Amino acid sequence: MKKNILVIGGTGKTGRRVVEQLQKKGVEPRIGSRNASPSFDWDNKDTWVEALNGIEKMYVTYYPDLAVPGAKEAIESLTHLSIELGVKKIVLLSGKGEMEAEACEKIVIDSGINYTIVRASWFNQNWSESFFLDPIISGEVALPMSDVLIPFVDANDIAEVAATVLLDDSYNGEVVEVTGPELINFKDAVEMIAKASNRSLNFHDITLKQYIMGMKQLQIPSDVVWLIEYLFNHVLTNPNNQLVINDVQRILGRKAKPFSEYAKTTASTGIWNQVNIN
């Protein structure tokens, strides 16, 4: 089977799900990751040419986020190389309400290549595959800005949308916004997780300064601390991020997955019922 589609970040939260969605559609994509063959490493441009060789379309995620320093330059270099090597289309995963991410989007949009931008809200999977998991396991969840409403979106919905627009050129030139079907806050999310996992979870409303200090005390890498502080300070409170957009339903013909359904499905895996050994 031809491997003319590249999924950069093909082992990450959305990337591996995009790979699965493409496989369901009978497409076997090339996985862009450090451990793949050929490998793709954002920090080593020497790997890019071989990874892009023979590729017509690609899904692009930048780790850890398009907002971080260096992302814009990397996206610019990759976009120009893609055009040189004959890539016909880029689907870029972006973040809603991030000015830096929109600068990266503009590079792709202005390049002349066919594109679809997929702008995502905060992921449900942050609670099971990312920085909110450990507090859930510990039973003590301390977060700032607990009253801010967020249209949490499921990574599976993001991936299904991305795979669809990757294969369907009728979405070329569009900026697609993927959100969940409802607005909830952090307290709501924790309550739903507690109910689904049959656990007692304590929620503590703290300041952003306290949260940042706590992460530093836990010796979380400085670039991760910077990103989370940026997301809370500039993205979470952006009014554009507190809107439910129906692009998931428009593209997939069904409603986006509600957080309660995500919580129920995820609880059944036992991920939230691990014994905390710290």
Image (spheres, helix red, strand yellow):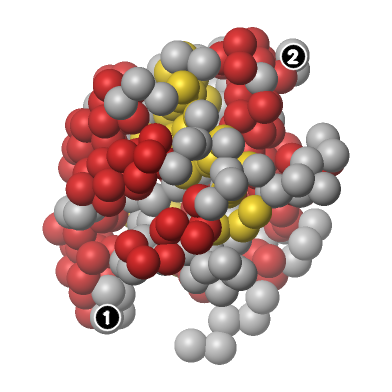
Q: Is residue 242 visible?
A: no
Q: Are marks 2 and 1 in contact (CB under 8 Å)?
A: no
For image coordinates 52% across by 58% down, the residue present is 51
Residue 233 at x, y = what percent? 19, 42
Circle 2 residue: 253
Say which residue appears at 51% left-offset and 29% top-offset: 88
Regarding residue 164, the answer to whether it shows in the image is yes
Mark 1 burial class by Cα count in 10 Å: few <14, some 14-19, many 20+:
few
Disc 2 residue type (three-letter): Gly
Identity of the residue furthest to the left in this view? 209
> In the image, is residue 239 above or below residue 34?
above
Rate crowding at label 2 as few (under 14), some (14 to 19) or many (20 or more) other CA atoms within 10 Å. few
Q: Which percent across, then down, holds residue 37?
A: 61, 69
* Residue 125 coordinates in the image, percent (x, y): 57, 50
Q: Amino acid at mark 1?
A: Gln
Of residues 160 and 35, the one nearer the viewer is 35
Q: Is residue 207 left or right of residue 142?
A: left
Quadrant of the rendered image containing residue 159? top right
Q: Secondary structure at mark 1?
A: loop
How far across and down, in percent of the image, does residue 239 sit? 28, 20
Labels 2 and 1: the sequence-earlier one: 1
- Give the residue at x 62% y 57%: 31
* Helix, strand or loop at mark 2: loop
Residue at the disc numbered 1: 219
Cα gap from disc 2 to disc 1, whole angstroms: 44 Å
Q: Which mark is residue 94?
A: none
**For this view, does 157 lie left or right of residue 123?**
right
